């Protein structure tokens, strides 16, 4: 997800993209954007998403207590501030944001997306049994973590129309076209670019061998004392 990419990396990527577009003078018409959309519909497919709150513990009895308290109608956010292994999750009241099946571990995805005979959790429902992860510490000790998920909201999967993703279609079409034109540009100007690099290298060497003001020229073999 783009949200997980550091801002400096995004800024540098955008800078390089804009520079490439300027060099090859790239622009995209609506027809080209629509053609790109039709040929690459899978890129615009929106998978089903759950907005989830997660509670976690390393104690099986606590996991049972979480589910019992949820059944009694307690606020999952309140419980997430009490029951969470990680302090950062307590700070955000267990909010793990929107999640596609592909972004979750197989066991967690199955508990959320395949609940209710494959229909998935309903909004304001929670996993009726904890998702259990077993692992070994560096010392070889076996440990377990118990996770309980609560569904805050849900968005069904969809195949949007061009008008719904017009901006994204233009951006991706322009990016693809820029890549193609940039490749052709370097292919057509490869000799020119190579000559410029050689010239730059030659000029740098000549500058390095030029005496600076106030210094004596480097002695040649003939100038060396005998």
Image (spheres, rainbow, N blue to C red):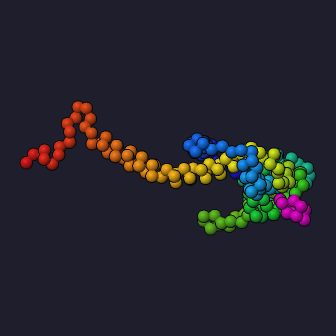
Q: Look at the image and tell me whether residue 216 can be seen.
A: yes
Q: Nearer the viewer, residue 41 or 189?
A: 189
Magenta part, dominant SS? helix
Q: Is residue 141 above or below residue 67?
A: below
- The answer to whether residue 57 shows anywhere in this view is no
Tell me: 125 left or right of 42.
right
Is residue 115 magenta-colored?
Answer: yes
Residue 57 falls in image quadrant: bottom right
User: Horizontal and vertical percent for residue 29?
Assistant: 71, 44
Q: Position of residue 183 (x, y in %)?
A: 56, 53
Write the residue at 74% across / 56% down. Answer: 40
- Front in this rendered view, residue 41 or 68: 41
In this rendering, the count of numbered labels is: 0
Above or below — where is 203 with respect to 40?
Answer: above
Highlighted range, magenta: 112-120
Camera-nearest residue between 188 and 16: 188
Residue 13 drawn in magenta: no
Residue under the image location 10 percent in, 45 percent down = 225
Residue at the farthest left position: 226
Residue 51: x and y in percent read 81, 50
Image-quadrant location for residue 10: top right
Q: Is residue 153 left or right of residue 14?
A: right
Seen at 69% across and 49% down, the residue is 173
On screen, residue 195 versus residue 40, left or right, reads left
In the rendering, at what x and y percent does residue 187 appear? 52, 54
Residue at (89%, 52%) from the top-left corner? Answer: 123
* Residue closer to the observer: 93 or 18: 18
């Amino acid at each position: 997800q783009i949200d997980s990419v550091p801002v400096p990396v995004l800024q540098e990527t955008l800078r390089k993209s804009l520079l490439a577009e300027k060099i090859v003078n790239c622009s995209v018409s609506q027809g080209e954007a629509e053609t790109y959309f039709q040929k690459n519909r899978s890129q615009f497919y929106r998978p089903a998403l759950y907005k989830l709150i997660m509670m976690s513990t390393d104690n099986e009895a606590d996991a049972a207590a979480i589910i019992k308290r949820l059944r009694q109608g307690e606020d999952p956010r309140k419980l997430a501030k009490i029951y969470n292994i990680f302090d950062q999750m307590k700070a955000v009241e267990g909010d793990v944001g929107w999640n596609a099946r592909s972004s979750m571990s197989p066991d967690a995805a199955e508990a959320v997306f395949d609940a209710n005979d494959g229909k998935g959790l309903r909004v304001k429902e929670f996993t009726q049994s904890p998702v259990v992860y077993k692992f070994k510490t560096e010392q070889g000790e076996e440990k377990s973590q118990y996770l309980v998920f609560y569904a805050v909201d849900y968005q069904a999967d969809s195949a949007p129309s061009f008008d719904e993703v017009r901006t994204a279609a233009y951006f991706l079409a322009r990016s693809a076209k820029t890549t193609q034109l940039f490749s052709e540009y370097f292919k057509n100007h490869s000799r020119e670019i190579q000559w410029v690099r050689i010239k730059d290298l030659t000029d740098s060497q000549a500058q390095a061998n030029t005496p600076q003001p106030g210094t004596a020229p480097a002695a040649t073999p003939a100038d060396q004392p005998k």
